[in-house]
Amino acid sequence: MKYPIAIFAVVGLLAVPLLTGCSVASPDAGHEAVWVEKPMIVGHGGINPIPVTTGRSYGWLTSNAIDVNMQPQRVDMEFDDMMTSSGVPVSFHVVAQFKVTDAVKLVSAFGADRDSDGKWGFWDRNMDQPLRTAVRDSVKKRDMQEMAISQTAADAVGAEVSTAANQLVQSLGVPIVFTTINVGRVNPPDAIKNQRIETAAQEQRAITMQQTKLAEDQRKMAEQSRASADNAYREAMQLSPDQFLQLERIKMQRDVCEHAACTFFIGGGPVPTVDAGKR
């Protein structure tokens, strides 16, 4: 009788940690924890319909709590060589932000698996390809020039894809809601970009030449006005052209002599001598 009692005692001691052991769930602010219960001996397994929102919760040692981020989450999608209506492919980046509305339904109906980057598996299975199709259909309605230059076109694509995305989650029953879907900068092929740069350079050269011509025309008009004024002055003073030129030379020599010692002769003769050191 001693041996059976000893066996039951050993089994009881071994069972105590298993029966009293437990898992702990304590989600951070903005998160919820969903229990996936796996009792060892008694009870029923499955998803607990009541999420852990605050504080601390305990479960079976073999159960685990799945953390669900209830804050806005972001998914980035790259699109390379997406064809436009003009037959020119473009590349761009799309950012989709969403929030989980029901953590328990998300885990129970769409799985709790995540990839190496932490992205939920339901996104690749249910959302990624339909959203890419919606983006492609929207971009195909617009030409390259519109997509690459007009921010209004990119915003329109984002709005159309947002509508399609929310219709998709409603039809599938995915417990998320999209907050924003934005289309980033649209890049045409390098050949198109180089042509646009060359066109811009040519346009700038044309503007520069036009401005140069305008400046020359203005200078010409100023010179013509000055010549007309000088001729009017000569006629008013009843001077011959030679006399007027001599008068202008005297004025020039006078201006020079105001700043330096010099000697000059009226009526021709030697060239004025200027002492540059006495300026």
Image (spheres, rainbow, N blue to C red):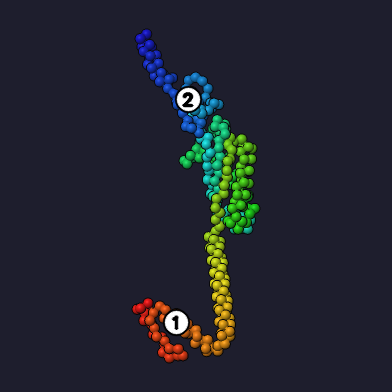
Which element carries disc 2, helix, strand or loop? Answer: strand
Q: Position of residue 256 (x, y in %)?
A: 43, 80
Q: Which of the image's four quarters has the C terminus?
A: bottom left
Amino acid type, label 1: Arg
Out of 185 and 270, give the one closest to the viewer: 270
Q: Earlier in the sequence, mark 1 or mark 2?
A: 2
Q: Position of residue 65 (x, y in %)?
A: 48, 29
Left/right of residue 278 with respect to residue 124 in the rendered view: left
Out of 13 and 8, give the one closest to the viewer: 13
At 41% across and 18% down in the image, what residue appears?
A: 16
Which one is in front in this view, the residue at disc 1 or the one at disc 2?
1
239 is higher (above) or lower (below) than 186: below
Amino acid type, label 2: Ser
Q: Which of the image's four quarters has the N terminus?
A: top left
Q: Position of residue 274 (x, y in %)?
A: 38, 82
Residue where numbered disc 1 is placed: 254
Can the viewer see residue 108?
Answer: no
At 45% across and 89% down in the image, what residue appears?
A: 266
At 41% across and 81% down in the image, what residue appears?
A: 257
Which element carries disc 1, helix, strand or loop? Answer: helix
Can the viewer see residue 188?
Answer: yes
Residue where numbered disc 2 is placed: 57
Out of 154 and 44, give the one closest to the viewer: 154
Q: Position of residue 72 (x, y in %)?
A: 53, 39
36 is higher (above) or lower (below) than 19: below
Out of 81 and 43, give the one closest to the viewer: 81
Q: Quadrant of residue 170?
A: top right
Q: Residues within 10 Å of mark 1 (few under 14, many from 20)?
A: few
